[in-house]
Image (cartoon, helix red, strand yellow):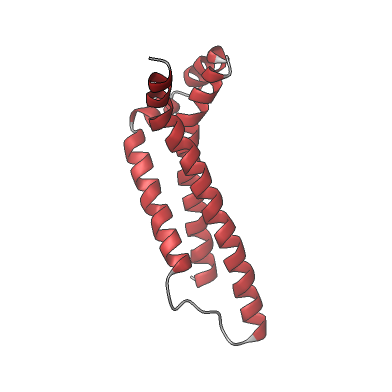
Amino acid sequence: MTPEIETRKWGWLILFASTTTLVCCALPIILVALGMGAVSAALFSSLPFLADLARHKAWFFSGSFILLALAAWALYRPGRTCPADPVLAGRCEAADKWNRRLVWGSASIWLVGFAAAYLALPLLEWIDP
């Protein structure tokens, strides 16, 4: 398997992992906050696997954080260079640009999910005791 295909698979895995944290934990909280609690209840009754995702959210957040940290290390590690061949160097730079976007987008999704799952309720209780 070529390194390009291997990198692409990891990128999509990281994006999927961070998106599941958003779907399981942030989406229901956002829907309820916007006054759409019935939509959230219908979503959980139509898709029962969402309840399992929410029940095991600590594992999902931990696993996706580890994947994001490994991806960031692989992307920003010291000594990473592109080939000297101009064609390969152009492909390497384009792939690097898209990988950076993918990692930062995944990290943003992860942070929104983490804030909704773990910080929203304590902040709400702190603001309005």
Viewer-closest of 11 and 101? 101
Residue 113 is situated, as x and y percent measured from the top left of the image, at 47, 36
Residue 43, position as x, y percentages in the image: 53, 20
Q: Please report the residue visible at 47 percent of the width from the left and 76 percent of the height from the top.
A: 80
| Screen quadrant of the C terminus | top left
Please state the horizontal and vertical placement of residue 122, each as a whole percent of the image: 37, 25
Looking at the picture, does residue 60 appear above or below residue 79? above
Q: Residue 115 versus residue 57: which sits nearer the camera? A: 115
Side of 128 where 5 appears, left or right: right
**Where is residue 85, by image quadrant?**
bottom right
Say if 112 sits above or below 5 in the image.
Answer: above
Residue drawn at the location 49% of the way across and 49% of the way down: 107
Outermost top residue: 38
For residue 40, side relative to residue 52 (left or right): right
**Residue at image location 46% in from the left, 67% down from the top:** 76
Note whether 82 is above or below 120 in the view shown: below
Residue 101 vertical placement versus 49 (above, below): below
Please indicate whether residue 117 sits to the left or right of residue 90 in the image.
left
* Image location of residue 111, percent across then percent down: 47, 42
Q: Outermost residue toward the bottom?
A: 84
Name the residue at 58% across, 19% down: 34
